[in-house]
Image (cartoon, helix red, strand yellow):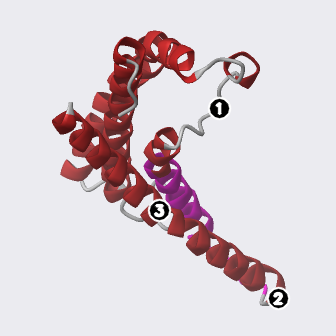
Amino acid sequence: MKRLSVVLKGIDKISICLGKLFSITTIIIMILQVTEIVLRYIFKSPTIWIWELCVYLYGTAFVMGGAWVLQEDLHVRTDLMVNNLNKRKRAFLDMILYPPLVFVFIFVMTPAQITAAIQSFLIKETSFNAWGPPVYHFKIILSIGFVIFGLQAVANWIRSIVLVFKGVEI
């Protein structure tokens, strides 16, 4: 049980560290958006690249932060039903609902994203607009985010199973 706890805490640390690291992109997005507003409305010189870069940065922050949000148990759920349950009953619901709701999503999306990232890397894919930046590195980051999200989901699910059957939180 101790080894399992160490592994699960390691997954938690990875989720937290990557989530915090990529949360910095929010500040970068804000700076870029203010820059675009100043360039567009004060200097009458809009860019073709800031908006697209912000979309890519937001996507990476969103996906890389997903595991951290899952680790902190802050994903949206039906609180009306769940808030009135004790921890063990909540764990039972998670134990039952993770496979059809979370794992199906992860097992479909993660391989698809990894395949898309590999193909994108092999052809050195670029964006379709006039700016045309390379996008394969963003797709690789998204793949890593899906893998980390999947690991965190498995860690949470294992914790639920242990709590249900052994009555112990790990």
Secondary structure beneath label 3: helix
Inspect the image, locate mark 3, and give the three-letter code of the amino acid beneath it: Lys
Q: Nearer the viewer, mark 2 or mark 3?
A: 3
Residue nearer the viewer, 128 or 107: 107
Residue nearer the viewer, 15 or 26: 15
Secondary structure beneath label 2: helix
What residue is disc 3 on?
A: 20
Q: Position of residue 89 (x, y in %)?
A: 55, 14
Inspect the image, locate mark 2, and give the three-letter code of the amino acid beneath it: Ile
Mark 1 vs mark 2: which is more N-terminal? Answer: 2
Per the rendered image, the range of residues in magenta is 44-64
Quadrant position of residue 137: bottom left
126 w.r.t. 115: above or below: below
Q: Nearer the viewer, mark 1 or mark 2?
A: 1
Classify 10 Å Cα crowding around label 3: few (below 14), some (14-19), many (20 and above): some
Secondary structure beneath label 1: loop
Quadrant position of residue 58: bottom right
Inspect the image, locate mark 1, and give the three-letter code of the amino acid beneath it: Val
